[in-house]
Image (cartoon, rainbow, N blue to C red):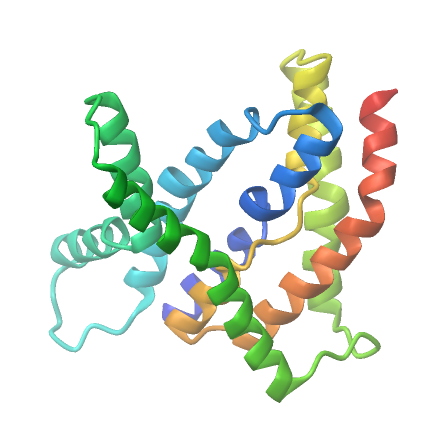
Amino acid sequence: MSKVVSISTFGRCTTPGNTAYFAVPVFITVFGTAAPIFPILLFQVCVLSLAVISLMELGRPDPAGRGPGRRLARAVGASLATPLVLACNAGILLNLLSVHLPAVVLDGAAFVGDSASPVALFALGLHLGGAGLDLRGTTREELALIGFKCLVFPLLTWAVCGAVFGVRGEWLAYLVLIAAMPTPQNLFVFAQRYDVGVALSASIVIKSSLVSLLLLPLWLQTVAS
């Protein structure tokens, strides 16, 4: 069961895009604002990440032999306590309650938040420094995942949002570009945490970023037409 859950979850992890660190500068450059990204970012963190982490926790061996109900409660509790999910939910709650935090607390939180991406990229670089990155040796599994993330998923988004839900104009462009973003470095972080497909995740993060960068002019031209 652990292996099946891990594989299915790994496939789902490649679908959310790198909205925080890749899409934001693209949107600011193209549209002059990154505001359309944040609802998608909140959905990814508060819903998708919650579901993915819960599945990964359920896939872990349970030496205590707890029942399904207790295992599910433990998995959901662990996902809610994950720093990424915890920080996002805390931010939403504090905004809804209109809580004004002292400047020193906000500065400290901003410093920790700004360090998250560099630390993840540093860990990714350390792994690649030891394992290396073989572009010529890209496997069929990698090609399938990268092809789906960088090409099929944006096309599906364009077709479903445009034809089924009737989205037009700028919002259709926003959604297609967000779908075209590369796999986020969180995939590598989760892979390391649960010791599942670490080398594969590192390869997908780097290679999907390269492919997305090459395809970005095509998507910009497509959504502008």
Residue 62 versus residue 212 in the image, above or below: below
User: Which of the 4 image quarters holds residue 141?
Assistant: bottom right
Q: Which residue is at a point 70% across and 41% down the rendered structure image?
A: 180
Q: Is residue 50 left or right of residue 129?
A: left
Q: Is residue 77 left or right of residue 150?
A: left
**Where's the N terminus, which quadrant?**
bottom left
Q: Which residue is at a point 23% across and 53% down the rendered structure image?
A: 81
User: Which of the 4 image quarters holds residue 17?
Assistant: top right
Residue 50 versus residue 144 in the image, above or below: above
Q: Which residue reaches farthest front?
A: 104
Q: Do we see residue 197 in this rendering?
A: no
Q: Do we see residue 192 in this rendering?
A: yes
Circle count: 0
Q: Which residue is at a point 59% across and 29% down the rendered structure image?
A: 34
**Where's the C terminus, which quadrant?**
top right
Q: Position of residue 173 (x, y in %)?
A: 72, 24
Q: Which residue is at a point 53% across and 71% down the rendered structure image?
A: 122
| Front in this rendered view, residue 113 or 84 | 113
Q: Position of residue 198 (x, y in %)?
A: 52, 75
Q: Position of residue 139 (x, y in %)?
A: 74, 73
Q: Is residue 159 left or right of residue 112?
A: right
